[in-house]
Each structure stands twice: as C-alpha cells, then as structure tokens.
Amino acid sequence: MKTVGRLILSAIFLALTGVMAAAARTAPDAVFAFYPAFSRKVLAAVSSVTAVVPFCIWEVVVLLAVLWLVYTLVRVFRHHGRGILSWLSGIVLTLCVFLFAFVGVWGLNHFGPDVSQQLGLSVREYSAAELTEATRYYAQQATRLASGVRRDEKQVGQFSDFSTLAKQAGKGYETLGQEYALFTGSTDRVKKLASWKLFSHFGITGIFICVTGEACVNPDTYVAWLPFTMCHEIAHRQAVAAEDGANFCAYLACMENPDAEFQYSGALAAYIYCSNALMKADRAAATEIWNSVDPGIRADAQAANEHYAQYEGKVQDAATKVNDAYLKAFSEETGVQSYGEVADLLIAWYQQKAPRT
C-alpha cells in the first residue's frame, strides 16, 4: 500500500507540474502578471535562510542523499530484493516533488517575458555593420577599464580572492533595483562550489539551485571572468531564467558595481561575446578591433583559453549535450547557443540606452 500511495502522490505532483507549464504556455499574460515577482520573493526568503552558512547547502544534501540511496539499496539486496518497489517508488516521489518545486518556484520563468521586454529594449536582426559598431564600443569600454585592474609582468589580470568578490557581487543589482523591478530580488552573497573539480571537467562555471536559493560559482573559473560569472548566477535569482538574459543582466550589474574589477569583467565579457559573433559575420572587422584593444585584454583572453583547454574532452562534451537538452526542454530553442545570443541584447543596449563617453 505504501508503494501505491507514493505512486499516486507522484502522479499528482507530476500532473500539477504539467498544469503549471501548460498555463504558462497558453495564458502567459495572466501567469506572468504575478509569477516573476512571486518567484523573486520566494527565492529571497529561501536565500535569506540558506545564506546563514557559507557553504553550498545543496551539495551537502546531494551527498547525504547519495549515501542514503546506497545504504537503503544495500539493505534491499540483503533482504533478497524485498522492498525494491517501495525503494523505487520513494525515489520517483522525491523526483516528482523536486520537479514540482523547481517549476513552481522558478522554472516557469523560462516561458516568461524576455529581459528585453522588461527593460524596454527593442531587439531585431542586426547587420554586420551594426554588430561591428557595437563590438568596437564594448572593446573601447573594456580597454578603458583594463587599466583599473592589477596585472602581472605578462599583463594578465590579478583579481581579489573569491570571498571578497562574492561579497561585492550583489552591489550592482542593488543599484539596478532602484530603477527596474526586474532587479529587486535577493543579492545575498555568492557561494563557492566545493565540488569544483567535477564542475570544471563538466565545463560548468556556475549553477543556480532554486530550491535552496543558492547562486553557486566554480572558483576555478578564470579570474577575469569570475566577477561576471557571479553576477550571471545572481541574475538567475532575480527570476531571469534564459541564459542570454542572465548574461546581459550580468553585464549591466557589473557596470553598475562600484568595484573596478567587476566593471572590467563585465566589459570584457560584453566585448568577447560581440567579438565572437562578429568573427562569424566579418572576420576582418573582428580582427581589426582585436588588434586595437589593450594588451591586457589579449593577455586575459589567451590565459583563459589556456586555462580551459585542460578540461576539454568527452566528459565536457557530454555535459554540454545534457545542458543543451535541458535548455531546449524549457523553450530555449537554440539550446547552449543561447549563451552567445546575448550579442543581440548588447547591440540593442548600445543603440538605445548605453551612455556615450
């Protein structure tokens, strides 16, 4: 009876999850009139509790869950398989409850309004000339800010330690929140992933866990990208689910941060994203701009490539495919390519709202 009861509950939670997803797709105006604000408030409440400890609570929970699964499975086989159905039904119920919580608290944001809509930006298809102009703007911005970062004899950037950056990461969002409702969520500190070696081999620089409200970052992320990555994960806690949107919000937050390291990291990321897009549209223009940037930018880009090269392989390829499938399942049709689509948002921002200096 216990097994049947668990399966019935699993079906109920799964059905409720499906109803929520269907409502978000068929009646988006009604759902997203309240859901993003609801999501931010719930995440802020949960984060205020989990932020009490400096480590990632979800990592501890996962470790304990794995140990418990192994322990209980061993017990099942010691009893010659008796209770295996009950064991499996418990796992199914747990997964269904987690999926329900994920979608109910945060996941529906994948189906919500784009960041461009919420910030009043008009995004369209852009010409190579427009992309070139925007790339040049962000290259000049990064060049101007590069001098604010300490550098070694090879011109590679030297940044503050993880803890210092983590405490500073939310400052930009606090400023943005005074102007945009989108950024009124939690700015609790970013946490360091304890299992960073595993994440490095998977090619993952950060992860947001909505059920604990924790924005977690891989400390092995190349230093010049670390501030930007922290802001990216905090963007997810602002109920921004789309990856291109989170990247764009991270840029805005970095530029509003009073710390020079964050400003440079954000400008560097914006330039790199636009430059990568321009390389496909006009390689000569991209190369010309690349040759004009501050030597520190080229040094950081080269150091980053060398740093990440050590982790390239089949494990990272497999992880990329899993992430691609997840993003496509939640209406990001281009999958992992959505990480690079931030270039369109950056062009729109440059044309419509970026300050001219």
Image: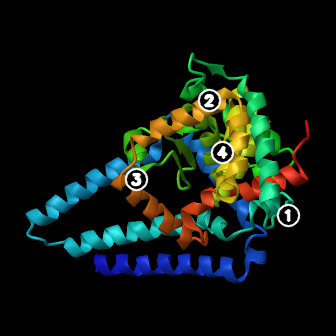
Q: Which mark is residue 272?
A: 4
Mark 3 or mark 2, earlier in chain: 2
Q: Indicate the amino acid at tag 1.
A: Ser
Q: How is the image coloured?
A: rainbow
In the picture, which quadrant includes the N terminus? bottom left
Nearest to viewer (mark 3 / mark 2)? 3
Mark 2 or mark 4, earlier in chain: 2
Nearest to viewer (mark 2 / mark 4)? 4
Extreme residue in the top direction: 153
In the picture of the structure, the residue carrying the numbered disc 1 is: 122
In the picture of the structure, the residue carrying the numbered disc 3 is: 316
Mark 4 or mark 3, earlier in chain: 4
Instruction: Locate residue 235, reporting x and y percent.
Output: 67, 49
Instruction: Locate residue 335, reporting x and y percent.
Output: 56, 66
In the picture of the structure, the residue carrying the numbered disc 2 is: 165
Mark 1 or mark 4, earlier in chain: 1
Are the residues at dot 1 and dot 4 in contact (C-beta closer than 8 Å)?
A: no
Whole-angstrom CA distance, mark 3 to mark 2, is 27 Å
Whole-angstrom CA distance, mark 4 to mark 3, is 21 Å
Q: Indicate the amino acid at tag 4.
A: Ile
